[in-house]
Image (cartoon, rainbow, N blue to C red):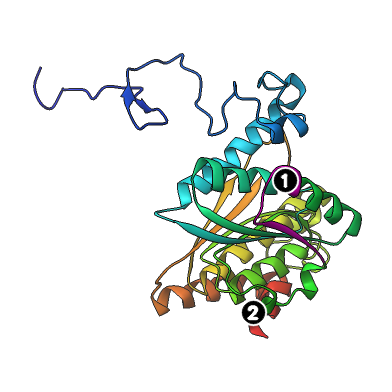
Amino acid sequence: MSKRMKRRPQGLWADADGVKEGKSHDRKKKHIIGEGTPIPLFVDMGVFTQEGKVVAAMQHKYKQINRFLEIIDDTLDDVRSLSVVDFGCGKSYLTFVLYHFLTEVKGIETTMVGLDLKADVIENCQKLAVKYGFRNLNFMCGDIGDFHEKKTERVDMVVSLHACDTATDYALHHAVQMGARFIFAVPCCQHELKGQMKTEDLSLLTRYGTVKDRAAALMTDAIRANLVASLGYKTHLMEFVDLAHTPKNMLIRAVKTKMPKRAKEMYLAEVERVCQMFGVRPLLKELFNA
């Protein structure tokens, strides 16, 4: 066989030790949090049985957890310590999972703060952090919009999962203000731009309710991504989980980087054109301008 026709071996994959093994088209996908180990956290969450098997009804949650961790793992480089803030942590399922992954799986020295409005939820989360021995995981009661960056001395990563409507904008704003190196946000319930959208040239996108809903949501996230990019972040919009599991599947991932001034200006100019075309005034744009 000539060099030109020589094929590379297919289906190679690396195990936990980085050793490549042979091909197999039928091999099951390797998950970061694998089955077989009855981790108390996952048993209490109802994801694992006492034997460490995934509960049938929680397969979607298990996939969601692993997909989230895959995105985190793919983004982090040679990181030895992290200070993390989770805005809108709620019952903190993924907060606990992320802390477990960073400290126990990756061996990263991690301090994490979870913020949420509900005092009873925060109290319960703090009890669970003690139960699992998560010494550097703490919770605060408060509103994302009223959060002051000075409450934390240093922040490397900001996470905001399913913060409702404009709460995501406040989370992104705080992340940039605090100089976070990594940002991961999964928006939810995006109503802000839908009520503002008006356009003569592209009225097709605003005539039908369902189309307008989706167009407004996509426009919201595209504007957010561009605004964050205009401030020096390499930003991606990616599918978080399959649409079959949840329609709230868009994730904004941003990593602070060195970016030419011209590139920043381009991102901002694109936002300006869309805002003028549709007559919208995104909150995040106003927050950054302020």
Q: Is residue 240 left or right of residue 233?
A: right
The residue tagged with tag 1: helix, strand or loop?
loop
**Residue drawn where x is 61% and y is 43% of the image:** 100
User: Among all residues in the image, which is located at the extreme right?
Assistant: 120
Q: Is residue 274 visible?
A: yes
Residue 146 at what x, y percent from top left? 79, 75
Q: Is residue 174 above or below residue 21?
A: below
**Residue drawn where x is 41% and y is 53% of the image:** 77
Q: Which residues are magenta?
A: 130-141
Q: Which is more N-terminal, label 2 or label 1?
A: 1
The residue tagged with tag 2: helix, strand or loop?
helix
Instruction: Mark 1 and mark 2 in contact? Answer it, CB < 8 Å.
Output: no
The residue beneath circle 2 is 288
Within 10 Å of disc 2 (Cα), the crowding (few <14, some 14-19, many 20+) is some
Q: Is residue 21 above or below residue 245?
A: above
The residue beneath circle 1 is 248
Which quarter of the picture shows residue 178? bottom right
Q: Is residue 21 left or right of residue 197?
A: left
Residue 101 at what x, y percent from top left? 57, 43
Instruction: Tell me the amino acid under the disc marked 1.
Output: Lys
- In the rendered image, the quadrant that contains the N terminus is top left
**Residue drawn where x is 43% and y is 68% of the image:** 257
Residue 13 at what x, y percent from top left? 37, 27
Q: Is residue 78 left or right of residue 269?
A: left
Q: Is residue 40 magenta?
A: no
Instruction: Tell me the amino acid under the disc marked 2.
Output: Phe
